[in-house]
Amino acid sequence: MSDEWVETTLGEVANYINGYPFKPADLSGSRLPVIRIKQLLDPSADVDYTDVDVPDKVLISDGDLIFSWSGSLASRIWDRGAAALNQHLFRVVERPGVSRGWLHLALDHAVTDLMEKTHGTTMKHVTKGVLESHRVTLPPLAVQRRIVDLMAHLDNHLANLRAEREALVMARTLFIDELTCGPLSIGGRFGALDEWQERSIGNLCTIKSGYAFKSSDWIEGGTPVIQIGNVKDFRIDSESMKSVSEEIAESAKRFRVVNGDILVAMTGNVGTVARVTALEEGFLVNQRVGLITECQTDQVDPDWLFFLLKSSPCQEGMRGRSKKSIQANISPTEFHGIPVRIPPLPAQREIAALLGAISDDVRTLDVEAAGLSDARTVVLTRLLSNSFDFPAGYDSLLVEVA
């Protein structure tokens, strides 16, 4: 690349303007939206309004660059109309010779390092001085725009993958209700409706609560234990998974899982359902996680049962039968009593195959998106450190202004 790259700091390439210190009484107006950290990061979050006359420097509009320096460190290009910026957010104004898009990428990339320099106990934050002193390598303006362009292509592809995934997830949710509950029996493909039988879940399978591990049981590097926080919809999250010794694991061996086992959250977010994969085989199940056992395979296909548990009637049944104390919980007895309608076994298998194919496509997109996200991080690091050579003849789609 060019020799014109300059070693500098974030403070030398931009000006950081803090938002207005609104008081609670200021946020009961109707004229101007007020953007706080939550609204910056979550487009669906409720917005407060103010009638307070604030300085022009804290007013934002589409295209402005915003940086959250307290709580969650994040860089965003604003795109939701005129608003006023609350304190704990900077409006970032680039200096001459600096592309706003490049600055957004530089701030986004700096977050990991800045997180290690945060202060505070109740709300972590990075000081303006620390932010401004963070070192960056500034390329020539033309190169900045090529970097922005290349990253935009990657980000668009990543956004398309995620949008395709969400569309598949929505379709799967719709099909689960239609296929597992009976209405979609076109042409008798899944058995005539009068062939569907009324049952309770307890007639089809048994659920048992996991082993009651104690906090003193946890060690580093032992047999992993699936806790309630690890049970997510359609998957098991291995992050922050705790482990126990082989001796304790042996005493809890009845609660080891195998590939294909179905797990149900019995406490908290009751009704969350996940399936064990080969990656989790041999793990143990903690209390408050329900393990489906003893499926009556002459009546129910386990693959179909998994999708049935995600249907609206089953989800509503679990929530409706759960008791509420400190948090919602459902007992095995209440779980077993949930009524369901089941089609003939061949139809169950066909339905499970259709829904399983959609789930396989969702997982494929997850893997592709995760791989592209990792690649994005590597590419961005190289682009911002002058260790990436653009292909010969690369021409940015963005208009370059000298």
Image (spheres, rainbow, N blue to C red):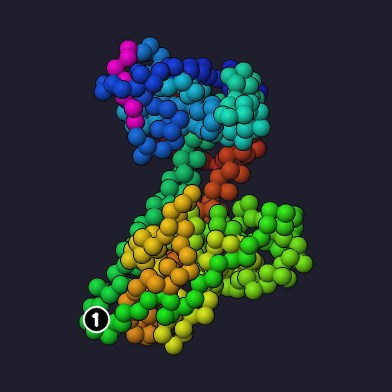
**166 in relation to 353, above or below:** above
> In the displayed image of the protein, which residue is found farthest to the left?
187
Residue 168 in magenta?
A: no
Comparing 265 with 38, the one in front is: 265
Q: Which residue is mark 1?
A: 193
Q: Is residue 197 left or right of residue 299?
A: left
Magenta span of residues: 47-53
In the picture, measured across the screen, residue 44 lies left or right of residue 235, that is: left
- In the image, what residue occupies the spot 30% across and 72% down? 181
Q: Residue at x 36, y 64 (%)?
A: 317
Q: Can the viewer see residue 145 in this picture?
A: no
Q: Amino acid at mark 1?
A: Leu
Q: Neighbour class for label 1 at 10 Å: few (<14), some, many (≥20)?
A: some
Q: Residue at x 54, y 71 (%)?
A: 208
The outermost residue toward the bottom is: 298
Residue nearest the observer in this picture, 356 or 283: 283
Secondary-structure class at tag 1: helix
x and y, in percent, of residue 55 in the image: 38, 11
